[in-house]
Amino acid sequence: MTESEIQCLKDSIGRLVEIETTFGERLVARVAFVMHSDEYDEHDVQYQMVSTNKPEAYAKAGDYVLDFDEIVSVKPRFNEAAES
């Protein structure tokens, strides 16, 4: 991920983003928390899944976590009202 994508995650707490993962998932997620700490070597995003091309990966409602290493790209989702 680029620094601008990391900043996009940080700026999107409580908002929707589109994420593409290294395992071929494309999802719309509501960002709950971003951990970006080089000191503790923790780099991940906690999110609520809104939609995905791999629904079988989500057995229950709730928050999920992706490590930054698992994320290929992130972009803000601007038409949020339709999915709230």
Image (tube, rainbow, N blue to C red):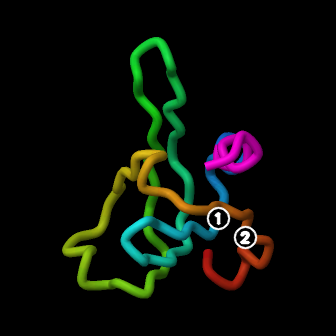
Residue 33 magenta:
no
Where residue 47 appears, as percent x and y from the top left, is 46, 55
Q: In which quarter of the image is the C terminus?
A: bottom right
Which residues make up the magenta segment?
1-9
Nearest the camera: 15 or 19? 19
Residue 5 magenta:
yes
Q: How crowded is mark 1: few (under 14 residues within 10 Å), some or many (20 or more)?
A: many
Residue type at the position of mark 1: Leu
In this view, 60 is above or below 12: below
Where disc 1 sits, the SS reads: strand
**Residue pictured at 32% horizontal, 60% vertical:** 62
Q: Is 46 situated left or right of 30 in this image?
A: left
**Residue pictured at 51% horizontal, 48% vertical:** 32
Label annotation for residue 16: 1
Label annotation for residue 77: 2
Q: Quadrant of residue 17?
A: bottom right
Q: How far apart are marks 2 and 1 (CA)?
A: 5 Å
Q: Is 47 situated left or right of 61 in this image?
A: right
Q: Do the residues labelled 2 and 1 touch (CB within 8 Å)?
A: yes
**Residue pictured at 53% horizontal, 66% vertical:** 29
**Residue pictured at 73% horizontal, 70% vertical:** 77
Residue type at the position of mark 2: Arg
Magenta stretch, main secondary structure class: helix
Nearest the camera: 28 or 75? 75
